[in-house]
Image (cartoon, helix red, strand yellow):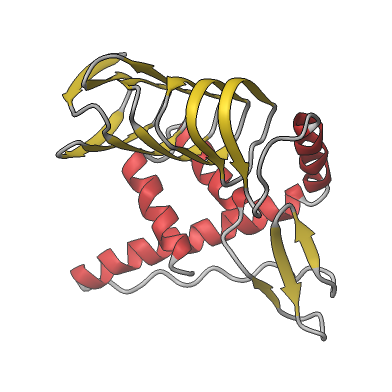
Amino acid sequence: MTTQTFSTGANPSIQIGNVAGDLIVTGWDRSEVEARGDEIRQTQTGSALSFSSSGDLILSVPRGSTITLGYVAGDVKLEDMNGAITVSFVGGDAILRNLSGQVSMAGAIGGDVQMENVGKISMSAGKSGLDTDLSERIRSRMEEAKRHAERKMRDAEQKIRRAEIKIQNAERKRRGVPPIPPVPPIPPMPPQARKFGRFHFAVDPSGVNETRQTVSDEERMVILKMLQEKKINSEEAEKLLAALEGGS
């Protein structure tokens, strides 16, 4: 595990992209950021930093930091900060402790959420505050999602493969090499609309064509799993996510 230190002001902006393992972010009374982990990728522009990791990532940051958290495959622990925090996707549990700034849970949490001394929190879809049965509702939603998980994972893997081919063909075109043949489509879903968590999938009236309305959490989870298993590195994961957002 390596350790890196970056000088910042008292209120830096910190973006955390893809973390294949667990993430811990703790506030401290220094005007610098300390990052510990393996295979960390980072960039810094003034007081703005961004991090990704192919394993676990541990950050010590100024208490007034603004944190934007992207995709974490494992558990997340955030504690002892007073800046704004945005959480997009966590594959495991989320532990929030001693956070006095605005906390926005903008995406999916795969496990339980534990909170202690959290001042302000808002959920996605305009929800504010936190119900006492949050963990149970999240668990129930994940159980419902599992009924379609196998199909969605296959669909996600195929779309990721198309994204990989898109990236490879761009390089082949640059080198004057013939492109890779396209991936054949998988059989369509039954002719009915599907709802998976907060993502919707619709088919036309004939039941022949399925239209995906947005990139799903399953696709992101497949990428994070590939990252965790070291089949791809952080840079390749970011390219795949960008290709998925741009369409297949």
Q: Is residue 21 visible?
A: no
Quarter of the image where one finds residue 152: bottom right
Q: Tell whether 50 sits left or right of 212.
A: left
Counting labels gives: 0
Q: Nearer the viewer, residue 135 or 111?
A: 135
Whether residue 123 is visible: yes
Q: Please give the name of the residue rendered at 62% of the width and 69% of the height, measured from the top-left corner.
A: 213
Vertically, is 143 above or below 77? below
Horizontal side, residue 106 vs residue 16: left or right: right
Position in image of residue 17 (x %, y %): 39, 41
Quadrant location, the N terminus: top left
Residue appearing at x 54%, y 33% in the figure: 73
Q: Quadrant of residue 198?
A: bottom right
At 59% from the left edge and 71% from the top edge, which residue is drawn? 184
Horizontal and vertical percent for residue 78?
Answer: 49, 23
Q: Residue at x 81, y 70 (%)?
A: 193
Instruction: Measuring from the top left, give residue 182's x and y in whole percent.
Output: 49, 72
80 w.r.t. 104: above or below: above
Q: Picture quarter containing residue 80?
A: top left
226 or 172, nearer to the observer: 226
Q: Position of residue 233 (x, y in %)?
A: 36, 38
Residue 23 horizontal side relative to residue 128, left or right = left
